[in-house]
Amino acid sequence: MSVVAALLPVAIYIFVVYRLDSFSLVSVKNLLLLVLCGIAAALVCFGLFTITGRILPDSVSDYVNPLLEEAVKAIPLLFLASRKKTVFFIDSVICGAAVGGGFSILENLFYLILGESLGIGTVLFRGLEVALVHMGCSAIISVGLMFGVRLSERIRSGLAVKTGDKVMAAFLLIVSPALHILHNSFHANPIIQFVTVFGALALLLIWIYQYDGDMIHRWLDRGLDKQVSLLMSIKDGQLGDTKTGRFLMSVKDNFPPEVFFDVICYVQLYVELSVAAKSRFMMREAGMDMPLSEPDKERYLSQYTEFKSLEGRLGKSARMTVAPVVKFYPADRKSLDDLLEECGK
């Protein structure tokens, strides 16, 4: 019964967080794999703590151990962020919470096996608090890593990055271990401590959600407006009407006419696919997730096939020239992958 009481809070938290994923960004299979990653992280930390326990006094361990825990839990989350597998707030939170939940499962079992005998109520309440700390802190770090990758992509592409966005990414990676250290260092009445932890993490995640929403709308609104304008200028034969079009015209003399024609087709297909993917994302966000018609599916798949064919046919020099225009950022790649999956690819 004590085992059930220790694991029940983790299961409840993971289920609640997963149900927030209205876009189905994380599959059940991947969620379970991340829980296993969290369990593996707990095993690694257990081994590390046997080493630090021999060389560090308890007063220092209260500060070092939370840092080690968050660093080890962050490894699978860094892998996901760097591979562009987490590109939005909600999938980052779900993945982070799953890793933290797996960590909590094993930690709670360790306390049951190695600790002193505890009552069901104490085990259940402790499980609620510890799971909340691990899942909340891992979720925050996951979002921070996602922000960091998102910004690094823009910097590598030579695009402007707001100072506030850089500060936000750094803040998230610092505040999570700081909260964990504070939780381990200061012990108050259990109920007060639980309410404080819950309130602090809830407010922080709400604030991050609103901040990410602003970044997503900047990505959708500004990017979509520019791409629609570019698409219209290409179809009307008026490339000089947009900044991107003027850039393309400026490199026209660098290529033979037939190659430049392929370049324009390549850019047009990219823009059409990107606009379609973003439009589908906006519809899902607005709760209007109507299925695509069969002609639309065939059209998008045909465009993607032609896009990849042109990509292979164009030389490296041509692709590098238009790289500032044909650039899939993490959110773009995710939205395009979702569109292709919806089309049956």
Image (cartoon, rainbow, N blue to C red):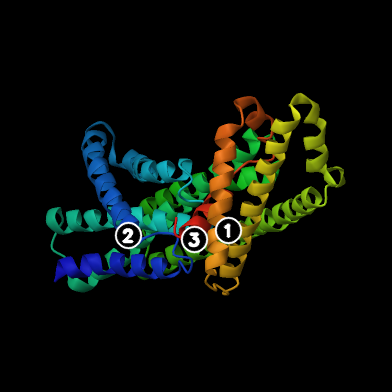
Q: Who's the residue at 53% across and 47% down the image?
A: 305
Q: Who's the residue at 76% across and 25% down the image?
A: 254
Residue type at mark 1? Arg
Residue type at mark 3? Cys
Nearest to N terminus: mark 2 or mark 1:
2
Nearest to N terminus: mark 1 or mark 3:
1
Residue beneath disc 1: 299
Is disc 2 surrounded by few (<14), some (14 to 19) or many (20+) residues within 10 Å? many
The vertical placement of 29 against 249, above or below, is below
Left or right? Give the position of 181 relative to 49.
right
| Alpha-carbon span between mark 2 and mark 1 | 50 Å
Q: Who's the residue at 53% across and 54% down the image?
A: 301
- Camera-side mark, 1 or 3: 1
Q: Where does residue 126 sit, x and y in percent of width and height?
A: 28, 64
Say the numbered circle drawn on residue 130: 2
Residue beneath disc 3: 343
- Between residues 23 and 106, which one lies in front from this camera angle? 23
Q: Where does residue 107 sit, x and y in percent of width and height?
A: 24, 54
| Alpha-carbon span between mark 2 and mark 3 | 42 Å
Left or right? Give the position of 267 relative to 122.
right
* Residue at far front of view: 258
Nearest to N terminus: mark 2 or mark 3:
2
The vertical placement of 253 against 106, above or below, is above
Q: Where does residue 130 sit, x and y in percent of width and height?
A: 32, 60
